Image (cartoon, grey):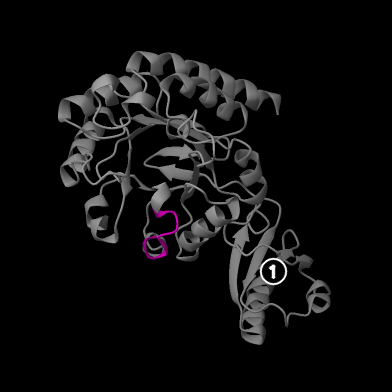
Amino acid sequence: MVVILKKNAPAEQVEQFQSWLAEHYQLEIHESIGQNCTLLGLVGDTTRVDIDLLQAMEIVENVRRIGEPYKFVNRKMHPQDTVVDCGGVPIGGGHFTIVAGPCSVESEEQILYVAQRVKAAGAGLLRGGAFKPRTSPYAFQGLRGEGIRLLLEAKKATGLPIVTEIMDLSQLPLFADVDVIQVGARNMQNFELLKELGHCKKPILLKRGLANTLQELLMSAEYILAGGNEQVILCERGLRTFETATRNTLDLSCVPLIHELSHLPVMVDPSHATGHARLVEPMALAAAAGGADALMIEVHNDPTHAVSDGAQSLTPDAFDLVAKKVFAVYDCAKNLK
C-alpha cells in the first residue's frame, strides 16, 4: 500500500503520522521524497488498514493499494527514475552509457589494450569476466582473483570503472574494489546471494535468467532492495526459446515494460542475446531507440582466438563504429520524447 502525502506537508505531522501507522498497524514504513510529493510505502499486513480513515487525514492526498508482489522496485512507490552511480558514471534517469570489454580477462596486455580502445570510443565502464560460469566443466573458467587484479590495473590505467560477475558468496571479499558487481543469468534466483548483496554498498547489475519472466526478474531485484541496497540495474540478455538461429531471443519489449513497472534502470546485452557479432549492431541500435539506459557489448582484440564467446565479440575497430551510431540514435530518440 502507498500513501501519497500532500505537497509541503509539515515535517512534524508527517513524523507523527508515520509513528502512528507503525504502532497502530504494526507496519514497516518506507519514505520516498519526490519533487512534487512524498510517498509512504506500507509494508506488512495492510488488510487491516482503514483506507477511508487515512484519506480523511489532513496531510494525506491519496491512498493506493499495490497489487504487485514487489514493493521496493515498484514505480508506484518510487515515481522518479533511479539513477545508479557506477563509480562516478550515472546510469538511468536520462543518463546513458555503454559497458564494453571482453567476455573473459585473458592477460594484462589484452585487457589494457581493450580498455584503452573502448574508452576512446566512448564507453563509460569496462566489463570483463574473471569468474566464468561455463556449461562444460572442461571449458576455460576464468583467471578468478588474478582476473580481478588485471581489471583493477586496467581501471588504474584508463580511469574506467569496472564490472565483473560474482558466482558465489565466498568470492565477495575479492570484489571489495570492484565498482559494479554483476549477477549472471544463472544466479538470478540465487536468493542467498541476492540477500547478501542487499547489504552491500555497491551497484548490482542483475541479469535476467535464461527463461525467467519479468515478474521473476523484478522479484529477484526486490531481494536486493529489501536488504537496503537500492543501487540495482536490470539487464535483458536474451531468453532461451525454440529459435536456434541466434544464441538467445532478445526481448526488447521488456525495456519499456520494465520502465512502466519499475524505477530501476534497464541495460540491454545484445552480445549474449544474439551470439553473433554481425547482429550486435542492429540490436544495439534498436535497444538505444527503445529507451534502454545502457548497453553491454563484448569487445575483444582478437575474437578469432578468444578463449570464450569470440563469435559474439566485436573488434575494437567495429566497436568504434557501433558506439558512434548508438550514441547518435539514443540522442535522436531522447529528443523525440
Which of these two is toward me, 243 or 92? 243
Residue located at (45% from left, 65% from top): 227
Q: Which residue is mark 1?
A: 1
Q: Is residue 22 left or right of residue 314?
A: right
Amino acid type for the residue under numbered disc 1: Met
**In the rendering, at what x and y percent does residue 324 appear?**
48, 16
Which of these two is toward me, 13 or 290? 290
The vertical placement of 300 against 176, above or below, is above
Does the image show residue 111? yes
In which quadrant of the rendered view does residue 126 lie?
A: top left
The quarter of the image holding the C terminus is top right
The quarter of the image holding the N terminus is bottom right
Q: Is residue 165 left or right of residue 261?
A: left
Q: Is residue 191 magenta?
A: yes
Q: Is residue 143 left or right of residue 61?
A: left
**In the rendering, at what x and y percent does residue 23 appear?**
62, 85
Does the image show residue 301? no
Question: Which region is colored magenta?
Answer: 187-193
Q: Is residue 105 magenta?
A: no
The vertical placement of 108 against 90, above or below, is above
